[in-house]
Structures are given as structure tokens and as C-alpha cells.
Image: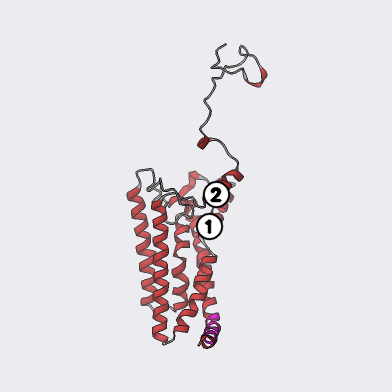
Amino acid sequence: MSSDFDVAPYGGTCNQAQIEKKQPPLPKSHEKITREQHIQELEDKRTILSADRIFPNDNNMPKYIIGFFTYIIFFVIIIPYLMIKNKVPSEFILAYMPNVDILATILGYDGGPTTYNALRYLYNPSNFTVYGFINATFINYLALLGVTYVIARDTHEKRSWEYGWAAAFICLFMTYLAPGNPIVIAQNNFETFLSKYGINDKHARPRYILITMIGLAMATILILCEAMVIRVTRPHIINIIKQVSNWLK
């Protein structure tokens, strides 16, 4: 018998079962590994970002760019502008601005509401591409610029740097304790829950709307809670800042 063939499976003879041709061994990069090995591999690399993947390997780049700038214009520029123009209390603006990354994470669920996946690289906590990393970094940058603007404005209007700085103790602290990954986990778990009731990929658009609305409701609660915490704790933080400042003189 030629060495290119294996014996029949399940202990039969070659005449009793279909002969299977031997497959060449898989390259090391294609070998199956356990979940624990995969986690260890990612932890050893310390990043999932790949310098070999600058842009996504598909033809949807124009749609990704349109989706990104649509989000920036509406959620990062227009909404804060309207809040400032209508004199919304600064606590709410300070709570909103650092959380635009969470809003982007929520809206980017499943790539967006259409089959074009225009929001796929909007703000993905698990970006492999440099393009996705740049998008996420730029959103973070604009969010921090918005926060520093409101703090500087409050400082100027109240003639108190302690008043302006006190809010940063809360909005920055709470924002970086509530990153996008828990939101992604919650959305994925809810997707699994819906699939048990027949709401699957065949119902992609209504599923997206439902999961996104739940995510936005969670984000709204987070922002409102953060604003209330800033309002309640700000006077106490101001007193602490003044005491420390006097101690350092």
C-alpha cells in the first residue's frame, strides 16, 4: 500500500471503509491551541495590536471612514455644543465627555445596524488593526480635550482653580474604572440570551436596535450617576484641595 494513505478509521480495513489521504502537518501558526494557551499567548505579547495590519483586509474602508466621522460630528461635536449652548450644568457635561468612548463601543456592536459594518472599527476594545487603534485613540483625545475645556471654563467663571480641578477627581476616576470591555461583555451575553428565543443573525437589525438601546440606557444611567456624584462630592473635594494646598505652602 502506498505510504500516502492511512488505514481506515475506527479500526476497519482499507477495503471496508473509505481510504483517507494523509494531510500534511499544519504549520505551527495554524495548530489548534486551548483557550488557556491562547490567553497566555496574548498576555505574553502584551498587546493584540498587529503592526502588520494597518487597515482592515476588505473593501469597506470608505464606509468605515464615513461611520467614524458621522459619530464624531454628532456625538463628540454637536451634542456637547448643544449642552454648552443651552447652559446644561457642567457636572453633566463633565460626565458625558469622558464617556463618549463607551457610547462608541455600544454603537459599534456587531459592526452597526447595516450589513456594511460601517461602525465596526469605531471603538473596538479588541482592535487588531492600526486603523482601529487610531480611531479609538482619537476619540479618547477629543474626549479629554472636552473635559479640559469644561474644567478651564469652570475655573474661569468661578475664579477658582480648586472648583474646576475638583470635578476632574470624579469624572476621570469613574471613567477609567468603567471602560468599554464590561459593556461589550454585557452586549455579548444579551445576544446569547436572545438567541435562545430565536433572535439570531436572521434578525440582525432588530437585534442590533434592541441590544444597542439597552446599552445606551446603561450608559445614560452611568452618566447621570457620575454627574450626581460630581455635584455631591465637589464641595468636599474643594475643601481637601485647599487644605493640601495650604499644607504645601
The x, y position of residue 35, in whole percent, is 60, 44
Please tell me whether residue 234 belongs to the stretch shown in magenta.
yes
Question: What residue is drawn where x is 44% and y is 74%?
Answer: 93
In the rendered structure, the answer to whether residue 64 lies left or right of residue 96 reads left
Boundaries of the magenta span: 232-244
The x, y position of residue 249, in whole percent, is 50, 88
Residue extending farthest to the front is 249
Question: What residue is drawn where x is 55% and y is 49%?
Answer: 44
Question: What residue is drawn where x is 38% and y is 43%?
Answer: 57
Above or below 183: residue 95: below
Q: Residues within 10 Å of mark 2 (few under 14, many from 20)?
A: few
Question: What residue is drawn where x is 49% and y is 62%?
Answer: 216
- Find residue 37 and report its image quarter: top right
Q: Hey, what amino acid is under mark 1?
A: Asn
Above or below 194: residue 142: below
Above or below 121: residue 28: above
Q: Earlier in the sequence, mark 2 or mark 1?
A: 2
The x, y position of residue 109, in whole percent, is 47, 53
The residue under label 1 is 181
Mark sitting on residue 150: none
Depth check, front residue: 195 or 243? 243
Colour scheme employed for the rendering of this structure: secondary structure
Foreground: disc 2 or disc 1 = 2
Question: Which quarter of the rendered picture does the N terminus lie within?
Answer: top right
Q: Residues within 10 Å of mark 1 (few under 14, many from 20)?
A: some
For mark 2, give the secondary structure.
Answer: helix
Q: Hey, what amino acid is under mark 2?
A: Asp
In the rendered structure, the answer to whether residue 155 lies left or right of residue 220 reads left
Mark sitting on residue 44: 2
The x, y position of residue 28, in whole percent, is 52, 35
For mark 1, give the secondary structure.
Answer: helix
